[in-house]
Amino acid sequence: MALKVDLRKNDKELTLFLTEHFSAFGTVRSVNIHRQPTPFALVAMSTPHETLNLAAQYEGSALGSHALVHLEQEGWTK
């Protein structure tokens, strides 16, 4: 399940939004936005438990200390 966000925002604005959003799962160490080939955020959490919880919430993947969360433009339907 992709997280629906406004992908028209620039990387700085989107990073700030995602950092605040993901803080519900614990301490966010960093958020890196990737737009190609498909949008995703690579999120570093402070503990493995937080990383796993974040990845599981969005059906993403845990890669070491990072969670990969797919992003989708809000308002789009498949």
Image (cartoon, rainbow, N blue to C red):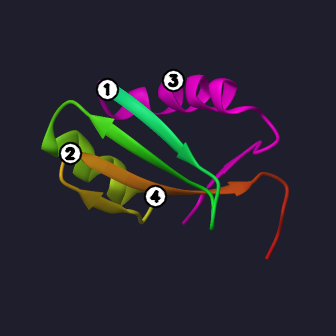
Between circles 2 and 3, the one closer to the viewer is 2
Discs 2, 1 touching: Cβ within 8 Å? yes
Specify the segment rendered in magenta. Answer: 1-27
Residue 55 location in percent, x, y? 35, 55
Residue occupying the point 46% across, 58% down: 58
The secondary structure type at the circle numbered 2 is loop
Residue wearing tag 3: 20
Residue wearing tag 4: 58
Residue wearing tag 1: 29
The total of numbered circles placed on residues is 4
Residue wearing tag 2: 65
Between circles 2 and 4, the one closer to the viewer is 2
Give whichever of discs 1 and 4 has the lower sequence position: 1
Calculate the distance from the C-alpha at mark 4 to the C-alpha at mark 3.
Answer: 16 Å
Give whichever of discs 2 and 4 has the lower sequence position: 4
The secondary structure type at the circle numbered 4 is loop
Calculate the distance from the C-alpha at mark 2 to the C-alpha at mark 3.
Answer: 18 Å
Calculate the distance from the C-alpha at mark 3 to the C-alpha at mark 1.
Answer: 11 Å
